[in-house]
Amino acid sequence: MSALPLHIRLDDLSDRRIAQFLEEHLQDMRATSPPESVHALDRSELRDPSVHFWSAWLPAESGALDGTLVGTAAIKRLDADHAELKSMRTSAAFRGQGIAKQVLLHVLKQARALGLRRLSLETGTQPFFAPAHKLYLAHGFEPCGPFGSYTLDPHSRFLTMAL
């Protein structure tokens, strides 16, 4: 399977399609995890200066004005050397086509370019998150304990990797 041709850009979150995409992300998180275990950031939190946010787009087809939003990811700086991966999402219609891998590899490259030495993440433990676990483990993330302000939670899985 060849990779879909993505345009991944640093984004200011002003496009209305991103607002809808992120609302769907929050709805999925609320549907799969108890309220106290939902740690997804909303659009205003993703605009914080400590956050870098990327959107992934399929190119426009001939005659179309713009492309199709198919993925997002962000990193939130925790300190000078450490950041957290946030808002990693692929559009439901495009899952299983390698988009998450392309976005993750892009974010890892950007994190290194920003001088980060460690990237960590929190994700759910429910079956819904199994594809994400597989992706992260395949690309060098390893299990770890809670980091930042997280505490032990049976509904959270923590992963980290040295960059």
Image: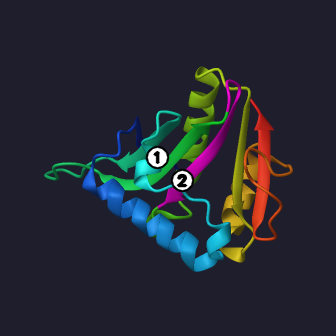
27 sits to left or right of 58: right
- The front one of 19 and 49 is 49
Does the image show residue 86? yes
Magenta segment: does it hold 77?
Answer: no
Quarter of the image where the N terminus is located: bottom right
- First reached walking from the N terminus: tag 1 or tag 2: 1
The three-letter code of the residue at mark 2 reads Ser
Q: Which stretch appears magenta?
A: 79-90
User: Residue 68, percent across and down?
Assistant: 31, 55
Residue depth check, mark 1 versus mark 2: number of the one nearer the observer: 1
Number of numbered discs on residues: 2
User: Residue 73, percent across and down?
Assistant: 52, 47
Tell me, what colour scheme is on the image?
Answer: rainbow
Residue placed at 67% from the left, 60% from the top? 132
The three-letter code of the residue at mark 1 reads Leu
Dots 1 and 2: beta carbons under 8 Å? Answer: yes
**What SS does tag 2 mark?**
strand
Q: Which residue has dot 1 on it? A: 46
Quarter of the image where the C terminus is located: top right
Q: Give the CA separation, mark 1 to mark 2.
A: 9 Å
Magenta segment: does it hold 81?
Answer: yes
Q: Which residue has dot 2 on it? A: 87
Residue 9 drawn above or below residue 67: above
